[in-house]
Image (cartoon, coloured by chain):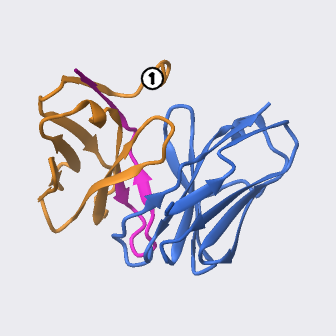
Chain colours: A orange, B blue
Amino acid sequence: GESVGLHLPTLSVQEGDNSIINCAYSNSASDYFIWYKQESGKGPQFIIDIRSNMDKRQGQRVTVLLNKTVKHLSLQIAATQPGDSAVYFCAENSGGSNYKLTFGKGTLLTVNP
Amino acid sequence: DTAVSQTPKYLVTQMGNDKSIKCEQNLGHDTMYWYKQDSKKFLKIMFSYNNKELIINETVPNRFSPKSPDKAHLNLHINSLELGDSAVYFCASSQDGLAGGDTQYFGPGTRLTVL
């Protein structure tokens, strides 16, 4: 399968459970953060974003939490569905006024029916 | 309608060859990007252009030359291809890209394999 040899952090959940994917970012000056979802063979797809003046933002079935003190970002997915299976990336704007996204390692989420 | 499109989707070529990947966006965005994703899924920015001007160049070998004929297109030309260039290359675009805090929309990727 695609995950063989990737050595990505992995999270396996049952359908209907809530999922929490964590990310540690590197630059304390980063002011904007995004979560992307990448399905097999496709490009990253925007899920939700948050600015550094917020600590929580909710979307449809997803919530992003930002803890600037410990430089930690998390993505919570409620009632996880098989279609949520993908690699999830956090990204930070580390370029200041020259908008440059630095991506995290990625987490492979597998949802078992 | 496809927002960010890339051609070709797959590219297989021999070491030493020169190849190009094309990208077009129909979102009316001002900024476009090229990213490289390696076999471990690590995604790293290579270049960004704002209104045809180079903004970011992330220490990419000069064998890689981006060209932006207009703000809707950003092509990537690679000279003297090497085995280590094998990866998936993604194009992306964002509305502004200079203010910080714009969503980037990604294309479907071009899988380059150098033999």
Amino acid under disc 1: Ser
> Percent from the top left, x then y, of residue A70?
18, 48
Return the residue at label 1.
A3
Please state which of residues B95 and A97 is positioned toward the viewer in this rendering: B95
- Locate residue A105 relative to residue B107 in the image: left or right: left
Tell me the subunit letter for badge 1.
Answer: A
> Percent from the top left, x then y, of residue B68?
68, 73
Mark 1, secondary structure of its residue: loop
Please state which of residues B12 and A49 is positioned toward the viewer in this rendering: B12
User: Which residue ends up furthest to the front in the rendered image?
Assistant: B1
The question of residue A101 being in magenta is answered with yes
- The boundaries of the magenta stretch are A91-113
Residue A22, picture quadrant? top left
- Locate residue A58 relative to residue B8 in the image: left or right: left
Check the image and report above or below for A111 versus B48.
above
- Locate residue B35 relative to residue A79 in the image: left or right: right
- Locate residue B34 relative to residue A71 in the image: left or right: right
Image point (18%, 56%), residue name: A68
